[in-house]
Image (spheres, helix red, strand yellow):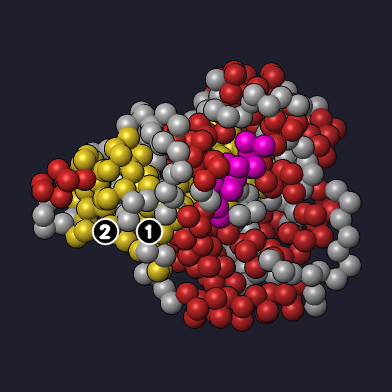
Amino acid sequence: MILIGNGRLLTRNGAEFFENGAVAADGRYIKEVGDCAAMRAKYPDAKWIDAHGGVIMPGLINMHNHIYSAFARGLSIRGYNPHNFNDILEGMWWKIDRCLTKENDCWSAKAVYADCIKNGVTTVFDHHASFFDIPGSLDEISSAAKEFGVRTSLCYEVSDRDGEEKRMQSILENERFIRKAALDDSDMQKGMMGLHAAFTLSDKTLEDCLAHGGSGAGFHVHCAEGPSDLMDSLRKYGKRIIHRFYDAGILGGKTLAIHCVHINQAEMELLKATGTAVVHNPESNMGNAVGCGPVIQMKKLGLLLGLGTDGYTNDMLESYKVGNIIHKHNLCDPTVAWGEIPEMLFQGNAEIAGRYFNAPLGVLKPGAYADIIVTDYDPLTPMDGGNANSHILFGMNGRSVVTTVCNGRVLMQDRRLLVCDEQELMAKCRESAKKLWAAVNA
């Protein structure tokens, strides 16, 4: 048993807050939360982790990431001069994923999971692509997640863009990993059917994905990220993207509809009617200049919304900050996003993740998984359960995290990673990245 205390405890169980609280974890589950002095007296033999007056709260969840994109940091691609989102995809990301080896998959995954731990992210929903070498690629990421102790959901990006052989390999890689993850009773890993986007997916491909496990595991799919995706769907099929996916049987309570930037109200209502969750990625949308997703309108309609990073960062609190700003700017309304964005991050992500994992996440209460983080934040104004989001928005970032626990395992304590030699890891990553960069520019 471990006992983490001597800090302000924000449980996310309603507005529950302890000025000097503690949380006890017995194995992989939360056993109890309460006043620190009382908890120390009750559990004198527990391993004590001192929060040193910081803030104790649930581990963060990233509902959409691209681990493989990590090795693009600092990369210069010969002749790359994008003018729109399609240029970015074809000129950078598709070049990279056509060169990624299993070695690259392994080291980029370890680097990203280490960074997630440092930023207090204990659950990651990832969307992978490595068209150079598809079969078994998800195992490289899976192994890294197990080694580093991070809870994760994995899928492979099915697409028609590289031909029939690669298309079928992608579908079968998803099917294989879905079955493999289902046999893992640790509840630390899940498999989904990954789909790229409507403009690279034929109706036949959608049918095959349904037939090879997608209907049970759910789909993790990019939806209407850029305007060209919508135009392609209208031109080829005479349908908007969400209607096309609905007709194909892709939507539903186990599906993650990523981005949804260029959708209309009828599509929003269809997403709500099918129980499909939408994941917003504000930094990526701004960086790719694809627009600002209408999540404020979606929220008013009652859709279930989550927050991701799309590989742009592993810092969910950074994503929170950008999400808070982009909608004010886009709508020219300073009153929006104060409540919607933190609800996506702290409540929406937990609810969506709960559709896949067996015990509650994103909350510190008895029976929830013991995913706990501690930040070094010492508030300069009074803090409680009612104003905690404001403190987090303006006073914390991912690197405020000093201690990270996932599934009852201490992964980082007092800013020291316990799962790897960080300097050695970064050196190995640089070696692997050099090989990838040479291949991309060959």
Name the residue tied to disc 1. Answer: 403
Q: Is residue 367 visible?
A: no
**Image quarter of residue 418:** bottom left
Q: CA distance from mark 1 to mark 2?
A: 9 Å
Residue lying farthest front? 380
* Percent coordinates x, y for residue 290 in the rendering: 78, 41
* Residue 323 magenta: yes
Q: Residue at x 42, y 65 (%)?
A: 415
* Percent coordinates x, y for residue 365 in the rendering: 27, 38
Asked whether, in this view, residue 44 is left or right of residue 177, the answer is left
Q: Residue at x 38, y 57 (%)?
A: 404
Name the residue tied to disc 2. Answer: 49
- Type of secondary structure dominating the magenta stretch: helix
* Percent coordinates x, y for residue 196 in the rendering: 67, 47
81 shown above or below 335? below
Task: Kindly identify the amino acid type of the residue bearing the numbered disc 1.
Answer: Thr
